[in-house]
Amino acid sequence: MNDMNISRIIIAVDGHSSTGKSTFAKAIAQKYGLLYVDTGALYRGVTLFAIENSLINQDNIIDSVKLESKLQSLRPEFRNTGENGKSELYLNDRLVEKEIRSLSVSSRVSYIAALPLVRNYVDKILRLYGERRGVVMDGRDIGTAVFPDAELKIFMTAEAKVRAERRYNEMIAKGEEADFQKILENIIERDYIDEHRDTAPLRMAPDAILLDNSHMSPEEQMEWISQKISQKWN
Ligand code: DC
């Protein structure tokens, strides 16, 4: 057993895109009374800001000099909705949850997230959230770069085809148009960019525990993590 109380630890949930990291991290936060921080939302917020200020073009070429100076005026903030610990991202007091999940943002965010200036900007915000401890963060580099000292690190993955199927079913259930092949290609492309960027590439930390949820239900995943947590913390 670990002496430290679970309310004082940092849990890093990193891994491939569309593996259900945020659902999983939110459920852990709710079960153990921790704060949940969706770190991808901040990269998405910066991407929306770049698009709206014409700082990224159709070919994903970014005006990084202007972006760096304009970022000074951006005030991202998570606000609680009061609903099951759910929080929503605001940019300069404007709610942007819907916009940051759009295809236009999703297809560009990996390029924005590859810029060291953007990673430094987001890391500073994340470290402020981490100061209070008692947080669960999901992302790509939380256990490797942002909080290498996190007490619990989970690396989530699943077969690309399974992830594309889940994403496809989600979109169909919402009544949205969906093209399975395109979704699969987008997932494979995002994995590649996340794993091959120079700054803080997606890697499993040596002390992380692997969770391949290709054939696991959300309940089985919670059972799995609850066991790991009860082995280490009281
Ligand atoms: O988890 P997500 O799909 O909302 O993440 C959006 C993008 O941000 C994704 O392309 C990877 C990037 N990201 C990152 O590079 N580092 C993080 N800690 C979180 C997300």
Image (cartoon, rainbow, N blue to C red):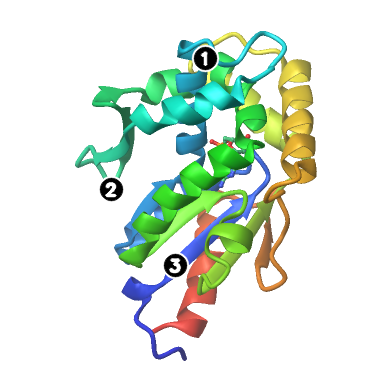
Q: Quadrant of residue 3?
A: bottom left
Q: Earlier in the sequence, mark 3 or mark 2?
A: 3
* Label 2 or label 1, whichever comes before in sequence order: 1
In this picture, residue 71 sits left or right of residue 66: left
Res. 38 in view: yes
Q: In the picture provided, is 105 more to the left or to the right than 187?
A: left
Quarter that holds the C terminus: bottom left
Q: Quadrant of ligand 1?
A: top right
Image marks 3 and 2: residues in contact by CB distance under 8 Å: no
* Residue picked out by circle 3: 10
Q: Residue at x 48, y 44 (%)?
A: 122
Confirm or deny contact between disc 2 and disc 1 (CB under 8 A): no
Residue 11 image position (x, y, % from top left)? 48, 64
Whether residue 170 is visible here, answered yes or no, is no
- Please give the label number shown on residue 85: 2
Kindly indicate the quadrant of the structure image that contains residue 58. Answer: top right
Looking at the rendered image, the disc whose residue lies closer to the viewer, 3 or 2, is 3
Coordinates of residue 43 in the picture (x, y in percent): 51, 35
